[in-house]
Each structure stands twice: as C-alpha cells, then as structure tokens.
C-alpha cells in the first residue's frame, strides 16, 4: 500500500527515469521495473504492467513533438517493429525450452560492446578502408531508403529484419524492453542520426506498449491506484525531456546512450546474483 512517504519519492524517481528514458529513446522500463520491485516492493507482474502503460503517454507526447520537428523515420520504425514483435514471441518460447543463464552473460557482453562503440574514436585514414561486414550486409537488396532533408540512408531490409528480430528475442528471453537495443542499432548499424534514432524508437514504444498494456490488463496486472505516481512521473519526464532535447547535441546524446547501455548491462549483471 502506497503512502505519502513512498508516493513522492516514487513520483520523483519515475520523473527522473522517464526523462532519461525518453532522452535516449529507451523508454525507461529496463530501469523502472527493477526499481519498483527492489525498492518499492511491487510484485514483478504489477511492476511490468504499470511501467508498460506509463510508457504510452510519455512516448506519445515526445512523438507528437518529434513529428513536428520531422525527426521520426516512420518507414524504419514500422519495418523494425514487425520482426521485433515476432522475435518477442520466439524469445518467450525459448524461455521454456533452454537454460538462459549463459545467454544472459552473452547479452551483457553484447551490451558492453555496444556501449564501448559509442566512446570509440571514429576510424580515420587506412583504418577507414578496412572491410566492414555490417556495412557490406547493409548493401544487400531489397533496400529501403530513409530520406532526410540533408541526407539519404539506404538500409537492407534483411539486416533490418534480423536486428528487429534480435531485439524482440532478447526482450522475450530476458523480460526487458527491446527499445534500448533499437536506438544503438539504428545509430551504429544503420548510421541514422542519434536524434532521429531516439525519436523513431519512441514512436515504436507506443506500438509495443499499447499491445502490452492490453495483455497486462487482461491478466489483471494493472493497478492504476498503486501505479499513479509512476504514470504521472513518466508524463512529467516526457515534458522535461522536451526541454532537455532542445539544448542537447548529437555528440552528447550518443555519449549518454553509451553510458545508459553500460548501466543496463550492470543492472542485468546484478540481477543474475539476486
């Protein structure tokens, strides 16, 4: 039962997580769920359900603003979201048939490598001429073209489908949102600007959160009376992020994504021992 002593800290915590989650395009569920379980003693199912429905208005508010700024690539978002949904179903199935402990360690290492990629210096000179497997695979047809005002990005539909399915499978296997994989994938694999990647990821979060919230409502995992501080905090965080993003540069955003990926890997590592 929530009291005033827990409602205010939970509201402020949710606002902080919501601001950071919207800023980097992850949503914030990967951090909010363990916080609700560990510090506010929510049952895991209720923590996931409350977080899921709280993501909807927060992502929607930012999506409206990002749409006006023409930052969202709807084409990339939709083509990435479809295999993600299928991957989530596959990942949930794998949980019942394989031991996931080693996969979790592999996933943590994968997150750390992704995090490192945001701090590694860009290749110059001869290093730039080395064979890049992902760049080569990204030339495989059919291609979809993402047109921006100042550039055009060609993305292989095969590669887009693979990484979408990978994100969904990881989400289904480990109970984390696929959003915090989609943003770095769009930046590092598909070379989209960081602000476009985060805006597109938030658009996709709306789709997954709506469908997920219906499921949690059906199973009785949604208690809005207990979850209103999280809901309100995420909405507040959405508006704070709009202000924050106005003053943010592409470089600072990429560095923040790298830090958040490292923290996500750290949290997953702690969960293995609890």
Image (cartoon, helix red, strand yellow):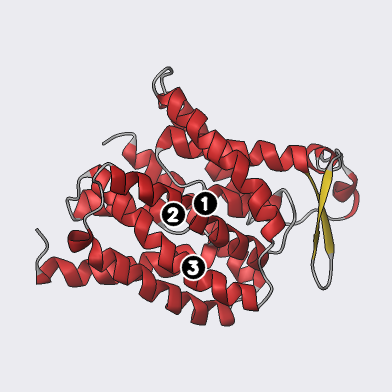
The residue singled out by tag 1 in the image is 180
Q: Position of residue 3 (x, y in %)?
A: 9, 67
Give me the C-alpha separation between circle 1 and circle 3: 17 Å
Q: Earlier in the sequence, mark 1 or mark 2?
A: 1
In the rendered view, does 267 fall on the left or right side of 115?
Answer: left
Q: Position of residue 13 (x, y in %)?
A: 29, 67
Query: Which of 139 and 266 lies nearest the eye of the viewer?
Result: 139
Query: Which of 190 and 1 lies nearest the eye of the viewer?
Result: 1
Asked where in the image residue 193 lies, by quadrant, the reply is bottom right
Of the 4 image quadrants, the one containing the C terminus is top left
Q: Are marks 1 and 3 in contact (CB under 8 Å)?
A: no
Of the 4 image quadrants, the one containing the N terminus is bottom left
In the rendered view, does 254 fall on the left or right side of 189?
Answer: left
Badge 3, how many Cα within 10 Å: few under 14, some, many 20+?
some
Q: Position of residue 156 (x, y in %)?
A: 79, 43
For marks 1 and 3, give the one nearer the viewer: 3
| Helix, strand or loop for disc 3 | helix
Asked where in the image residue 12 lies, by quadrant, the reply is bottom left
Q: Residue visible at 40% across and 50% down?
A: 30
């Amino acid at each position: 039962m929530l009291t005033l002593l827990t409602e205010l800290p939970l509201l402020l915590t949710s606002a902080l997580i919501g601001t950071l989650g919207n800023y980097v395009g992850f949503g914030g569920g990967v951090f909010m769920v363990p916080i609700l379980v560990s510090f506010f003693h929510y049952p895991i199912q209720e923590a996931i359900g409350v977080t899921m429905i709280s993501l909807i208005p927060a992502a929607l508010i930012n999506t409206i603003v990002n749409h006006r700024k023409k930052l969202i690539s709807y084409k990339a978002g939709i083509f990435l979201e479809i295999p993600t949904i299928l991957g989530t179903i596959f990942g949930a199935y794998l949980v019942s048939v394989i031991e996931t402990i080693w996969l979790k360690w592999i996933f943590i290492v994968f997150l750390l490598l992704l995090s490192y990629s945001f701090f590694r210096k860009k290749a110059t000179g001869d290093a730039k001429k080395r064979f890049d497997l992902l760049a080569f695979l990204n030339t495989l047809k059919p291609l979809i073209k993402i047109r921006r005002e100042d550039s055009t990005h060609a993305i292989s539909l095969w590669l887009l489908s693979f990484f979408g399915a990978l994100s969904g499978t990881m989400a289904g296997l480990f109970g984390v949102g696929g959003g915090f994989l989609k943003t770095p994938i769009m930046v590092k694999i598909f070379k989209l600007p960081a602000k476009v990647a985060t805006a597109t990821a938030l658009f996709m979060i709306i789709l997954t959160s709506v469908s997920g919230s219906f499921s949690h409502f059906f199973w009785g995992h949604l208690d809005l009376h207990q979850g209103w501080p999280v809901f309100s905090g995420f909405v507040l965080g959405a508006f704070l992020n709009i202000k924050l993003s106005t003053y943010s540069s592409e470089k600072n955003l990429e560095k923040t994504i790298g830090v958040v990926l490292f923290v996500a890997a750290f949290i997953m590592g702690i969960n293995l021992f609890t």
